[in-house]
Image (tube, rainbow, N blue to C red):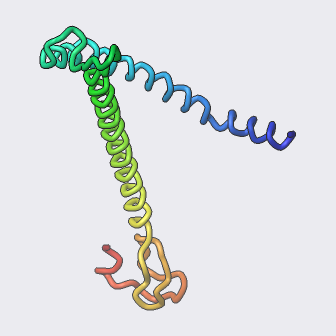
Amino acid sequence: MKKFVSEFKEFIQQGNVLDLAVGVIIGGAFGAIVNALIDNLINPLIAMIGGTDIGLAVVIKGQTLNFGAFISAILNFLIVAFIVFLIVKSANKAKSLVEKKEEEEEAATTKICPFCKSEIDIEATKCPHCTSDIPEEEAAE
């Protein structure tokens, strides 16, 4: 039990809880926006197509099969899934750009000695490993 409590404390201190809370709050707010879109714009369009107040519905033996509500739920899911896809795609692209920039910065600080193949500073004119003079074109790169 003590291990569980210590793991929970570590989890809380990492900041994951705050990130999760922000995600849930934003997700709830976005869900409300999508529900408003479905309820106020799309459902009335479905009702116009169906010709009744409740939209595309069929009554069988006193039970109502509301196809309009089902279509609304599908559209709601598709809208949320598409927006989440766009957010994840843009976040991944931004992350890859940052990683690529970091890799380029790392690669630009060193070069390889043409004689002993050791890694040396990019501005070196003499190899500290084999003491060879680095040719001008090698030193300029």
Q: Quadrant of the N terminus?
A: top right
Along the viewing direction, whichever of 130 and 76 lies nearer the viewer: 76
Total number of numbered labels? 0
Say left or right for 11 vs 111.
right
- Residue 52 in picture, x, y percent from top left: 18, 11
Which corner quadrant of the image does residue 57 belong to? top left
Say left or right for 117 vs 139.
right
Q: Please name the residue shown 30% across and 31% down the image.
A: 74
Furthest residue toward top? 53
Furthest residue toward front? 61
Q: Please name the residue shown 45% across and 21% down the image.
A: 28
- Residue 40 in picture, x, y percent from top left: 25, 12
89 in relation to 25, above or below: below
Q: Please name the residue shown 21% across and 8% down the image.
A: 53
Which corner quadrant of the image does residue 43 belong to? top left
Q: Please name the residue shown 39% across and 65% down the image.
A: 108
Along the viewing direction, whichever of 21 and 93 lies nearer the viewer: 21
Q: Quadrant of the C terminus?
A: bottom left
Furthest residue toward right? 2
- Residue 32 in picture, x, y percent from top left: 38, 17
- Residue 8 in picture, x, y percent from top left: 74, 37
42 in relation to 100, above or below: above
Along the viewing direction, whichever of 109 and 57 lies nearer the viewer: 57
